[in-house]
Amino acid sequence: MDYVYVGTIVGTHGIRGEVKVRSNSDFKAERFRKNNTLYVRRQGEMVEIVIDSHRTHKDFDLITFNHLTNINDVLDYVNCDLYIHKDQLRKLAADEYYYHELVGLTVCDEDGIKIGVVADVTEYPQGAMLVVDKPDGGQALIPFVSAFVKSVDLEKRLITITPIEGLL
């Protein structure tokens, strides 16, 4: 797939064409910048949209796009997923990763014992957390900081961590 998921339009906000987005983007300010191009999966097709405005409200990103200024014009976009094209991704430093690159990687401790698989990366005020599906059906939240995450190997699809008591 040539597109990377960045969020979902979950509703409208007001009557002037603004929509609420539950974002899963690494760089929200960049993704929703005025005149930036995003893609909406709508009725099975990828439809290009251009951002007119962006602001945050509570836990949502609020955007307007394609010069649509009426609630009736944006209702069809509610519950549609937003994407960027992979060509829009900027190069990161050697020790930085896009969230979509981490999802699906196996998580092991330093002894090579499998802890689980990364199901999601979630932003909290304290920082990013790896949501790891464990083999027993449970989940673990692991802070994505160097104190816990010792290495990330995208080629081997492996994250090595140093767990502390109570983390898992």
Image: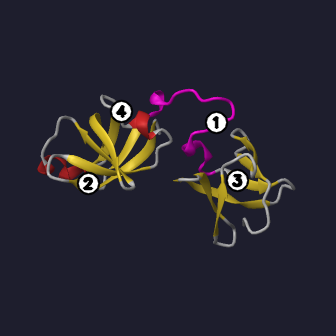
- Can you identify the residue that label 1 sits on? 96
**Element class at badge 4:** loop
**Residue sitting at x 77%, y 52%:** 161
Q: Mark 4 is on which residue type?
A: Arg
Instruction: Report, in whole angstroms, how far the alpha carbon at label 2 lies from the one at label 3.
Output: 34 Å
**Residue sitting at x 61%, y 38%:** 97
Q: Earlier in the sequence, mark 4 or mark 1?
A: 4
Q: Nearer the viewer, residue 42 or 140?
A: 140
- Can you identify the residue that label 2 sits on? 78
Residue 8 visible here: yes
Picture quadrant where residue 54 is located: top left
Q: Are marks 4 and 1 in contact (CB under 8 Å)?
A: no
**Bounds of the magenta span?**
85-104
- Can you identify the residue that label 4 sits on? 33
**Element class at badge 3:** strand
Residue 167 image position (x, y, % from top left): 72, 65
